[in-house]
Image (tube, rainbow, N blue to C red):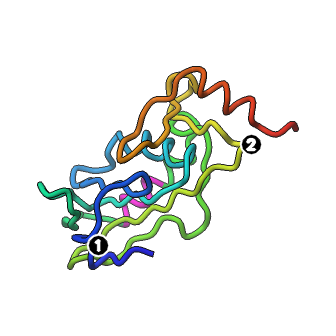
Amino acid sequence: MLDLDGLRYYKETNRLEAKRAQGGLPHSIWETYSAFANTYGGILLLGVAEAPDRTLYSVPLADPEALARQFLALVNDRRVASANVLRPGDVRVVPSGGNRIVFIEVPRADPALKPVYVGEDPLTGTYRRSGEGDYRCTPEEVRAMLRARPAP
């Protein structure tokens, strides 16, 4: 578990992504959700920014509970994300550095659900995580995930 009061000791990695989210739910959250689900899983922090030295710090959110509710509603909308891989308790509002942030733990998707993609087309909406970035999967990578699905 992360020490959320010690965010300054963390940097974005292949399993950790920070989003300021002060203007609402960022559109790029879905690419990161897809990438985490399709690779090793990871933690999304909303209400967290990156300093010039790449360390993290919390920022005030107007209504973190509303942001968490919006995320949960949209992750269940098949026009937004192809699958909800979250478990109960994976989305919560937690204190950090005098602010309240949204903590989202995205587990690695079961092979039967892969690829987890954004929108309605797996060939254009499937992402993977590499380093601290989200990258669109090639059609070959998407087809490999589809072939790896267990037989029904």
> Is residue 22 highlighted in magenta?
no
- Relative to 22, does residue 91 appear above or below in the rendering? below
Residue at x 19%, y 56% (from the top left corner): 54
Q: Is residue 133 above or below residue 73?
A: above
Instruction: Report whether 84 appears left or right of 147.
Output: left
101 or 6, which is in the foreground?
Answer: 6
Quadrant showing the C terminus = top right
In this rendered view, identify the residue nearer to me: 52 or 65. Answer: 52
Local SS, label 1: strand
List the single residue furthest toward the front: 131
Amino acid type indicated by mark 2: Ala
Q: Horizontal placement of 11 versus 144: left or right? A: left
Residue 135 on image: x %, y %: 42, 34
Q: Position of residue 56 (x, y in %)?
A: 23, 63
Q: Position of residue 71 (x, y in %)?
A: 44, 53
Residue sitting farthest toward the right: 152
Q: Which residue is mark 1?
A: 100
> What numbered label is drawn on residue 112?
2
Rendered view: 105 above or below 126: below
Q: Could you tell me which residue is drawn at 82 percent across and 40 percent down?
A: 150
Mark 1: few/some/many CA within 10 Å (<14, 14-19, 20+): many
Q: Amino acid at mark 1?
A: Arg
Magenta-highlighted residues: 65-71
